[in-house]
Image (cartoon, rainbow, N blue to C red):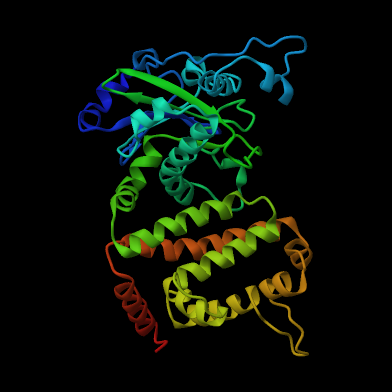
Amino acid sequence: MVNLVEEFSNELRHGGHLIVMPLSRILIEDECEIGKYRFYPIGEVDINALRPVDNNSLTLIENGEINDDDWMILNFGNEALREAATAITGAGPDMFKTNPLLAFTVNNLNWDEFLEATTHDYDKKILRVLTREAEKAMDLLKFYLCRADLIDTLPGTVGTWNGSNGFSSALLFNIDDYESYIIAGSVITHTVVKGIGLELGLNETESIREECEAILSTSGEVGTIVKTALAMHTTFLETNNPTTQFVKAMTLLEFLAYPDDFEKFENVRKQITPHIATDYNHYLNLKERFNELTGKKDETGKHIGYRTRIVHIGDDLEDILGDEMEVKQVMLEVQIYIGKVIVDMIKNHEMTWSEFEELRKQKKRSLGIV
């Protein structure tokens, strides 16, 4: 079994705190890593070696339920209630032993403040921060490995586990005390349930490792923008309503074109298509296709563009297309457009935005657009 204290010894010696979070809807075949994030199959990690401290739990009576009045009359201190709120979720050492895990270190955790905190709300705040940190790696995996027309392969939110019922959890380890604490609570608003999730192994991570590590460690202006774009891409993938999903895709394209501004979609299209087109004829075809996807009018002046009909007329994408397969094809199509731009941004993550805009102009010139 893997001893995480040994695995992360260098980071821990330099003041880092080890974080371990369960994963759901993901089958990890081999231990693998992306940057500072390491993924482990079920049962691979020696949880006992992290010396998790037991949380106090409530002894439930009668039908095993506690209402608000029960909480008020129980003679528990705030700290005990904090621990009981975690215990009641089912998050404990055994849960970490029976689910795939993600481990990483953070340098901004105030351990004294964590130990002195007395409310469950504090734990939920920490969980939200840790989830956002962990999702940086998952955003990249979802970008490279998940398809908009196949939601079945989407992994769950980091921190959730098999049977978690919407709860999230994390184990926090401090090397000086040489012990860990488990916290858990309700911090996410929705979860994917369709399908079995994502298969992840060395073959998948090694093929994208260089690009992922570049983005995770970048401080470039374009790199910072693409991190936001990747998070927006995850939101696009996880949206379960096709009409809303399409609108989110259009919003993401607008962001990729003008991260700090708002422009009409005709101008957005001019910034996006140079990343996609292979030649001038392809560019002309894309120009017409983007018109169909957004604001096209027929010969009578009637709006038939998808985006205009959805946003300004109130139509559903399913009504516009009329076929589930067509809806899936459109989702995959716009994801490909988004992906082409993001890939170019990843390749040039160290650029300033002005330099990236110049790159776009070069692409336009090579296509004969300007």
Q: Residue at x 20, y 30 (%)?
A: 10
Q: Residue 188: x, y in percent? A: 59, 40
**In the figure, 134 relative to 270: above or below?**
above
The picture quadrant where one finds residue 106 is: top left
Closer to us: 286 or 101: 101
Q: Quadrant of the N terminus?
A: top left
Closer to us: 173 or 331: 173
Tell me, yes or no, if residue 325 can be seen here.
yes
Q: Residue 266: x, y in percent? A: 55, 82
Closer to us: 248 or 287: 248
Q: Residue at x 69, y 57 (%)?
A: 242
The picture quadrant where one finds residue 304 is: bottom right
Q: Is residue 317 left or right of residue 128?
A: right
**In the figure, 50 relative to 303: above or below?**
above
Q: Residue 59: x, y in percent? A: 64, 9
Q: How many marks?
A: 0
Q: Is residue 175 left or right of residue 369?
A: left
Q: Residue at x 44, y 71 (%)?
A: 260
Q: Is residue 168 left or right of residue 8?
A: right
**In the figure, 19 relative to 211: above or below?**
above
Tell me, yes or no, if residue 40 can be seen here.
no
Q: Quadrant of the C terminus?
A: bottom left
Q: Residue 219: x, y in percent? A: 28, 57
